[in-house]
Image (tube, rainbow, N blue to C red):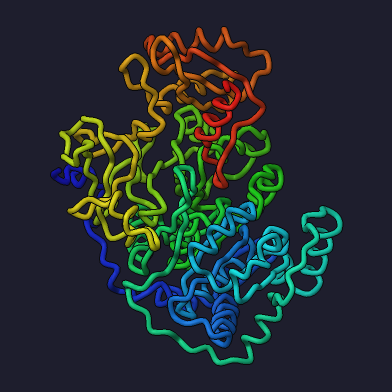
Amino acid sequence: MEKIWLKNYPANMPQEIDASQYGSLVALLDEAMRKYKDRVAFRCMGASLSYGELDQLSAQVASWLQAKGLKKGSRVAVMMPNVLQYPVVVAGILRAGCVVVNVNPMYTPRELEHQLQDSGAEAIFILENFATTLQAIHARGHLKHVVVASMGDLMGLIKGALTNFVVRRVRKMVPAWSLPGHHGFGQVLAEGARQAYQPVSLTPDDVAFLQYTGGTTGVSKGATLLQRNLLSNVLQCEAWLMNGVDRQAFPQLNVVCALPLYHIFALTVCALMGIRNGACMLLIPNPRDIPGFIKELSQFRFHLFPAVNTLYSGLMNNPEFAKLDFSSLQVTIGGGMAVQRAVAERWKAITGKPIIEGYGLSETSPVATCNPNNIEVYTGTIGLPLPSTEVSIRDDDGQELALGQAGEICIRGPQVMAGYWHRAEETAQVMTPDGFFKTGDVGIVDEQGYVKIVDRKKDMVLVSGFNVYPNEVEDVAVLHPGVLEAAVIGVPDAHSGEAVKLFVVRRDPELTKEDLAEFCKEQLTGYKRPKYIEFRDDLPKSNVGKILRRELRDADLKKAA
């Protein structure tokens, strides 16, 4: 496919990026920590960490790992939410030449054990709030070293002690745990300070992260992300999102980090791109606490705000959010799931800024396409391919389709992973002979080069031979003023093969199924209309707020049985 999207690139946007200026992520970190050493790098719960402190503390973590015998390429797991220790630990692991294995802190013991076994992690850094999960499997001996951190470790003596007391005793957020032979985070820093950190020679082709997929499509697999994959995507995102931002008016960018940094979207767009630009990043450990989140935002003049559709919606449903000062907001980027028109239009009305929807996957480090940051209204698309990125729409035989025809979205670019960790067969299934990654998403490219997702292949509902794409039905449902959230699945139907079932969380408790069915009838042709509607108190979501249709399908099948 001809790169027709280039003709619609914003002014001054490069068609290609060059990541060769850095040999590794460590080179990027070193540059930023020297250049911005006196700036605040991260803020969390009233405490802060400067770039100079990030440099010093991460070197101590690196030297401790080296003293424990971990070599270049050794895998080290990190199981933490957005706390100050997270960037210190990740920078330290990278500087030691090791590979970061990000772990969702909400994992069950079974999920954690699979990831530790699959990655071959030798060590783990874990917040004590989640230590009981590790305790359940620790005796099986997957790890050589366990480091346990507490919430207040980097908050200073008095504030740290007070924070730990509240977390442990008042809020009771730390279940009892026992991990014989573990190391305390403070102990690691003290021991690391007595060792000399030895810089490690790294190349662009060395592995930086094993980023495990969400597991919603089967067994969780580690996307092998090389140094050059992340470096490329940081520079691609910077070129795209910072285009047109007045850096004279905002010499230090303020970035909201509400999405968990262990998720690839936040890791790249918040942490790594933020560090590269000398930004101040506001860490939100628990974005589900909307009142607390809004209170933090009220004390922070934010410029860049990455999030997912459900988080934007949750914020706007609190009346205090609209009272915030949005005069400094430059870019709002939505990813991780589809941004719904109703949410985007409401956000624009409240903040004065549009949500710039992007698209990507763990396998693409993650951003592959994005709407330009100069759009004024919701486009309903995932935008244009980023610099150095190609998109090809292909059929089931791997043949490229014409403009406007729906097929599998395939991506080629420097941000595409090296493959799935130790899974050559599964890697071969998702990579084309000419180097494109097959996303499993169905989409089209229009004549302007904009990419539009129709839906996941596996989520498509087949009604009497007609394709029904859940996103379309969900987008219609949430336009009803009485609907807060919606999700669609296909259910077996004797007459049509499958029928559409709509799950709804009500905004208006008086909303009836009949009212909603009539509304959908006005918006959707016959075969797309929900045959079944079920009201629920909530919908199952992943750690970043993505609605899990698979869980709804599984629950529905059990109920039918």
User: Going by the image, does 321 lie left or right of 478?
Assistant: right
Residue 461 place in picture, x, y as percent? 39, 24
User: Going by the image, does 319 lie left or right of 496?
Assistant: right
Q: Which of 64 and 18 is in front in this view?
A: 64
Q: Which of 517 and 132 is in front in this view?
A: 132
Query: Is 493 drawn above or below residue 206 in the view shown?
Result: above
**What is the tally of numbered marks visible in this picture?**
0
User: Going by the image, does 29 lie left or right of 124?
Assistant: left
- Which residue is drawn at the image coordinates 55% and 37% (left, top)? 310
Q: Nearer the viewer, residue 325 or 237?
A: 237
Quarter occupied by the N terminus: top left
Residue 247 place in picture, x, y as percent? 42, 60
Which quarter of the picture shows residue 188? bottom right
Query: Is 376 drawn above or below residue 192 in the view shown?
Result: above
Residue 530 place in picture, x, y as percent? 47, 15
- Which residue is drawn at the image coordinates 63% and 13% (left, top)? 511
User: Going by the image, does 403 lie left or right of 380?
Assistant: left
| Residue 244 can be seen in this image | no
- Which residue is drawn at the image coordinates 79% and 64% (left, top)? 164
Residue 529 place in picture, x, y as percent? 44, 13
Which quarter of the picture shows residue 363? bottom left
